[in-house]
Amino acid sequence: MTHEQILELLPIHALDALEGDQLAEVDAHVSNCEVCSTELSTLYSVTATLTSDVPAPLGVWDRIEAEIEGESSSAKVISLEEASSRKGKGAMWFASIAAAAALIFAGLAVFQRGTINDLSGPEGVIVAAESAAEEPGAIVADFETDDGSVAQVVLSPDGEGFVLPADSLDPLDEDRTYQLWVITPDEQVISAGVLGNDPEPARFTWSGEVAGFALTRERAGGVISSEGDVVSVIEA
Amino acid sequence: MVEASITWGDLNRYDAEMAGRVASGDVSALEELYKGHGGAVASLAFRVLRDQALAEDVVQDTFVGFWKSPDRYDPTRGSLRTFLLTIAHRRAVDIVRSEEARARRELQPPEPDRFDLEDEVITRQLSAEVRSALDDLPEGERKAIAMAYFGGLSYVEVARRMGEPEGTVKSRIRSGMRKLSSSLQGVAT
């Protein structure tokens, strides 16, 4: 293609609407052509105006921070038995557990309310959870306290997970949050996401085997390693 | 009375400074950028992917990628927001196209048309200038741009779904983008 022909394709390229050999040829030309490079930058700035600024999703930062800082951290291993024995005692029982390298979590409903949660509201989560619970091999487990079940966890065989809080799960002060943890068969405890101080039905994904789950109370925004007290621990 | 305002030069210097802090390993700088731009990146990724978990993966990949290679951002080429959105969009499109390919292999029918720019909640959150510029586009141009950008479709696939010749779709996208570029000169950074 000539320079002029490529220049004509740049508006399409700015939408990422080229592919294959055509994309490769345009990219190669742009990397060596100041005129086209400048024009493409201008077009990218136009496409960027088509996206509105909304509050950043709350929980994803934890994952980013864990990935960039966690490579050098080592995971402290605790047993389910140990975890269960500390249930309800308010101990800092995850003290130095690093989520980092093993943080496979791909998202609870951590988008701030009133932003884009209209696209995946609580009712939709409940319907999806009910469907997932019926799949052969699905894990369905209840977080229980002395007051009975306070939340239910559903994890489908393909790793799609749901947390369904019950009315009996008391709201926390605004500077606190509930946080979900997955306990793996090799007894690592890994953050699966931040639920907020007054949780609504939420999604998460998990790839890998699960031995149990834990629900804790933490400071708002969530933590990589638990600093709070345990609400409930369940064996999957 | 002199009113305080933020100029492009100020923004450019701020972005360059932030990129420099990230390059030096300052996690708090990345967190500040995440708070400032993470919502837009998430919004765009979600709009393309229609899947919250995948969108959050794209957000994570985008910011971790910037952390690892901040020198890929050139402040003289545009804003950091535009850079991050560009990276996120391409990643989201890659995912969509891989899903599209899988769907074709499994002979699944294409998803129904879901790329209308006008009935989206998110569109209502755009600035008045952007909404006005979009409103001024002919329907065919607006739809072609929306299907490509928010649907993650190649122009070839857009043409197939619109039942139009590829050349027609290319012309509509070119024309629409030129008009947007002209009318949004004061908004685009």
Image (spheres, helix red, strand yellow):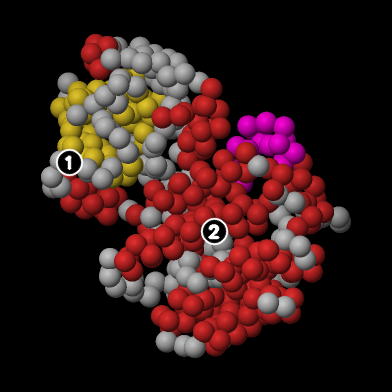
Q: Residue at x 18, y 37 (%)?
A: A139
Separation of marks 2 and 1 at Cα, in angstroms? 33 Å
Query: Does any portion of residue A202 appear in the rendered image?
Result: no
Q: Position of residue B92 (x, y in %)?
A: 49, 57
Q: Position of residue B150 (x, y in %)?
A: 49, 67
Q: Nearer the viewer, residue A53 or A154?
A: A154
Give the secondary structure at mark 2.
helix
Q: Is A225 one of the magenta-colored residues?
A: no
Q: Position of residue A76 (x, y in %)?
A: 40, 15
Toward which corner of the image does residue B107 lie, by quadrant? bottom left
Q: What is the quadrant of the C terminus of chain B in the image?
A: bottom right
Q: What is the quadrant of the N terminus of chain B in the image?
A: bottom right
Which label was assigned to residue B176? none
Residue B23 lies, with reference to residue A88, above or below; the image says below
Residue A162 lies, with reference to residue A150, above or below; the image says below
Residue A39 lies, with reference to residue B70, above or below; the image says below
Q: Residue at x 68, y 77 (%)?
A: A1
Q: Which residues are magenta?
A: B18-36
Q: Is B21 one of the magenta-colored residues?
A: yes
